């Protein structure tokens, strides 16, 4: 046994050194589960809006790790905060207090305008947490009979990949052969207030869980007043509105949150006509600047206080390392005015892309908000055209990824400059022109 321990201690020394993209891809293919289909690019370095592969080729990043690195890759302020905290205290579990969690909880609740926060780690954990809180609120505050609570969700949603979450997905690829599924969800068309009002009249409804913009569905942007009308309809029926801003939040859409409309203030003022305050807010991804998994559910006291000790938790949720990183990541968003930059550059991007769409029939339409945008390719969802375009974009130094077959999502880090954006638009236009022949 001692010899085995000594042998294992040398594993790191014997770990294979990656010298080529082909070698790295072969290793993943052999030893890793095939649960993703990555673009054939092997990345080894990131800084700001740029990424470099193993061979040293430089790329513009137009995915931002699915909007987790809004602040740019390896932001120096967030990196320094991580290093400092990593050398002090990283994890205590929640069996004890620590000297970072309380300041974080005060900071984030004031930042987003809520009474309470429940910190977790991943986005899916945040969604699961919100579901549990909403159900418990329904039983203990609304008077719904136990095990009868229903939550309304939207078609083509993406809230994660846990068993409960895929139970209310209509993506066959996410669901097939993972059943039996969890009951208690009502699925309605997205961006359809009439359908929501009908569903809200069913018995035992406790919440409406919705993305203000459906990112994975192809950056499907609803009517400007959709969230406002949804909140009013929910309020009328004493139902909680839960906003999943894991991908759309933290300045991505040109405001601090997508539910803010056109408001870019830090924190929320209910006098802002464009701001709709959800009853629960789910955050993840860019709340950490891409350094460390952090998610959070925010709500006011009358909702959050249904959770009592021992009823929900996480060993790593609220750990000192994660929350120090999150506070710094949010400071960067505020101090560098990333929401304002996303709004300005997003409009420039859509203007450039619209001219391209008008010129080249292969590009069907552009849509989005802030720096969360998509170009729909004029081909069927089961075609390889969008994938082939993304491969060619990578060859030309720009990384993007298709979603739903024929849609290409474009979401660069929010630290991008106007000059860099125009250079990227030039690359996209050249590649689209090639495919339009």
Image (cartoon, grey):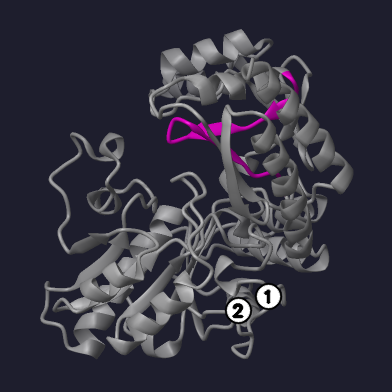
x, y (%) of residue 244?
A: 45, 63
Q: Is residue 32 above or below residue 229?
A: above
Q: Nearer the viewer, residue 391 or 2?
A: 391
* Residue at image mark 2: 274
Residue 118 in sight from this viewpoint: no
Residue span colored magenta: 396-413
Relative side of 262 to 1, left or right: right
Q: Secondary structure at mark 2?
A: loop
Reply yes or no: does residue 403 show up in magenta.
yes
Residue 351 appears left or right of 108: right
Image position, residue 131 (x, y; %): 31, 67
Indicate left or right for 31 with 154 as reference: right
Assign the C terminus to one quadrant of the image.
Answer: top right
Contact, mark 1 vs mark 2 (Cβ under 8 Å): yes
Residue at image position (62%, 55%) is 286
Residue 281 image position (x, y, % from top left):
48, 71
Q: Residue at x 66, y 30 (%)?
A: 399
Residue wearing tag 1: 263
Q: Quadrant of residue 16?
A: top right
- First in sequence: mark 1 vs mark 2: 1
Residue 363 is inside the magenta segment: no
Whether 323 is drawn above or below 103: the answer is above
Q: Quadrant of residue 420 in the image?
A: top right
Looking at this view, is 98 or 314 the one in front?
Answer: 314
Mark 2 Cα within 10 Å, few/some/many (few <14, many 20+)?
A: some
Residue at left offset 50%, top offset 49%: 215
């Amino acid at each position: 046994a001692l010899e085995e321990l000594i042998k294992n201690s040398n594993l790191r020394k014997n770990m294979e050194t990656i010298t080529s993209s082909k070698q790295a891809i072969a290793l993943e293919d052999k030893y890793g589960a095939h649960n993703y289909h990555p673009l054939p690019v092997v990345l080894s370095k990131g800084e700001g809006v740029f990424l470099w592969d193993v061979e040293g080729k430089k790329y513009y990043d137009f995915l931002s790790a699915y909007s987790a690195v809004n602040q740019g890759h390896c932001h120096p302020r967030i990196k320094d905060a991580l290093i400092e905290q990593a050398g002090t205290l990283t994890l205590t579990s929640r069996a004890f207090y620590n000297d970072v969690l309380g300041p974080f909880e005060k900071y984030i609740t004031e930042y987003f305008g809520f009474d309470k926060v429940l910190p977790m780690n991943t986005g899916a954990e945040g969604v699961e947490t919100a579901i549990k809180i909403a159900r418990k609120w329904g039983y203990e505050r609304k008077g719904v009979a136990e095990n009868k609570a229903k939550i309304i969700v939207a078609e083509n949603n993406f809230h994660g990949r846990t068993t409960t979450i895929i139970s209310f997905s209509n993506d066959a690829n996410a669901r097939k052969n993972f059943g039996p599924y969890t009951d208690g969800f009502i699925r309605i068309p997205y961006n359809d207030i009439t359908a929501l009002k009908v569903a809200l009249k069913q018995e035992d409804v406790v919440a409406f869980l919705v993305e203000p913009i459906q990112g994975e569905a192809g950056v499907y942007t609803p009517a400007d007043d959709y969230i406002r009308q949804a909140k009013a309809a929910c309020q009328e029926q004493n139902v909680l509105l839960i906003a999943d801003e894991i991908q759309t939040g933290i300045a991505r859409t040109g405001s601090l949150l997508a539910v803010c409309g056109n408001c870019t203030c830090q924190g929320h003022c209910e006098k802002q006509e464009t701001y709709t305050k959800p009853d629960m807010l789910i955050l993840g991804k860019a709340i950490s600047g891409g350094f460390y998994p952090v998610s959070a559910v925010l709500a006011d006291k009358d909702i959050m206080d249904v959770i009592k000790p021992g009823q929900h938790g996480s060993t790593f949720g609220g750990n000192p390392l994660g929350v120090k990183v999150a506070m710094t990541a949010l400071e960067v968003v505020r101090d560098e005015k990333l929401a304002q930059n996303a709004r300005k550059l997003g409009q420039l991007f859509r203007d450039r892309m619209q001219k391209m769409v008008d010129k080249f029939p292969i590009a069907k339409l552009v849509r989005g908000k802030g720096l969360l945008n998509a170009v729909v390719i004029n081909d069927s969802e089961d075609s390889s055209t969008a994938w082939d375009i993304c491969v060619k974009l990578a060859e030309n130094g720009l990384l993007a990824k298709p979603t739903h077959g024929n849609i290409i999502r474009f979401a660069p880090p929010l630290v991008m400059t106007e000059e860099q954006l125009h250079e990227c638009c030039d690359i996209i236009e050249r590649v689209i022109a090639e495919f339009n022949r």
